[in-house]
Amino acid sequence: MDIAENIDQLQQELAPSGCKLIAVSKTKPISTLMEAYEAGVRDFGENKVQEMVSKYEQMPKDIRWHMVGHLQRNKVKYIAPFVHLIHSVDSIRLLEEINKQGAKNNRTISCLLQAHIAEEESKFGFSDEEIFQLIRDETIQHLKYVKIVGVMGMASFTPNETQVHQEFEHLKLLFEALKHNDDLPDQIRMEEISMGMSGDYRIAIEEGSTMVRIGTTIFGERNYHQ
Ligand SMILES: *Cc1c(COP(=O)(O)O)cnc(C)c1O
């Protein structure tokens, strides 16, 4: 695997759309992350709190750390001091905990609402209806230490490209509907659509992604047993 070359190739593909690259480095060692860092990557994505904290401590401090995996409320406190963007907010209670930890650290924490766009049952995320409920919920008005800056979604894992197109298009339409909603609370400003992984990022870009989360295409297959 030539990590620098993979990154360079991806950056060239992303350039015309201005879509940002989040290098998903979960399970990979520091030495591997440093190769990506030296190739210019400053946005890294992790899906486990402990692993992200440990890497944060060891890596250069100009990195923006993205939490892309399911986040448990009792672990928010560990990443609250430094996390750049939480992509995987899937409940109001989680948002309230992020607000509480943001307040403790005196920083506003940026978040994306994870929308359930895949046909598959197993994926986390809000339904469209729940998101529209959430933005009208009075609770949101009191959360001064969170900023909702967009949406995130994962398409079905399927070779059916038409379906993947449809699922990403759905997320884009949801984003637009939220963006053009007249009475969004101050905490919500729709700017980012986080969609696209190694297997489907080209489709995601065509459908208007602003952030792709890519692991395997940069770092190679993950070995969970190492
Ligand atoms: C692991 C992961 C990715 C990256 O997946 P690849 O297929 O390796 O590119 C992206 N998003 C989330 C939420 C992930 O957990």
Image (spheres, rainbow, N blue to C red):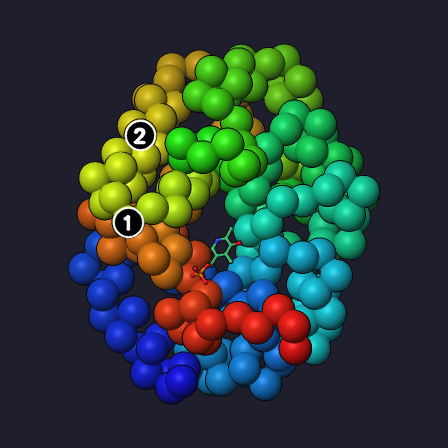
Q: Which mark is residue 170?
A: 2
User: Is there a contact, CB below 8 Å, between mark 1 and mark 2?
Assistant: no
Callout 2: 10 Å neighbours few (<14), some, many (20+)? Answer: some
Callout 1: 10 Å neighbours few (<14), some, many (20+)? Answer: few
Residue at screen point 75% across, 61% down = 50
Task: Evaluate whether residue 196 shows in this view.
Answer: yes
Front one among 99 and 215? 215
Q: Which residue is mark 1?
A: 159
55 is higher (above) or lower (below) than 154? below
Residue at screen point 59% across, 60% down = 46
Dot 2: element:
helix
Residue at screen point 26% across, 62% down = 14
Number of numbered labels in the structure image: 2
Residue at screen point 22% across, 65% down = 13
Residue type indicated by callout 2:
His
Q: Position of residue 116 (x, y in %)?
A: 47, 31
Mark 1 or 2, which is nearer the eye?
1
Instruction: Say whether disc 1 or disc 2 marks the residue closer to the N-terminus.
Output: 1
Dot 1: element:
loop
**Quarter of the rendering containing residue 213:** bottom left
Classify the position of the C terminus by image quarter: bottom right
Front one among 106 and 4? 4
Front one among 93 and 158? 158
For this view, does 56 lie left or right of residue 118? Answer: right
Classify the position of the N terminus by image quarter: bottom left
Residue type indicated by callout 1:
Pro
Front one among 60 and 159? 159
35 is higher (above) or lower (below) than 184? below
99 is higher (above) or lower (below) than 202? above
Measure the alpha-carbon separation of dots 1 and 2.
18 Å
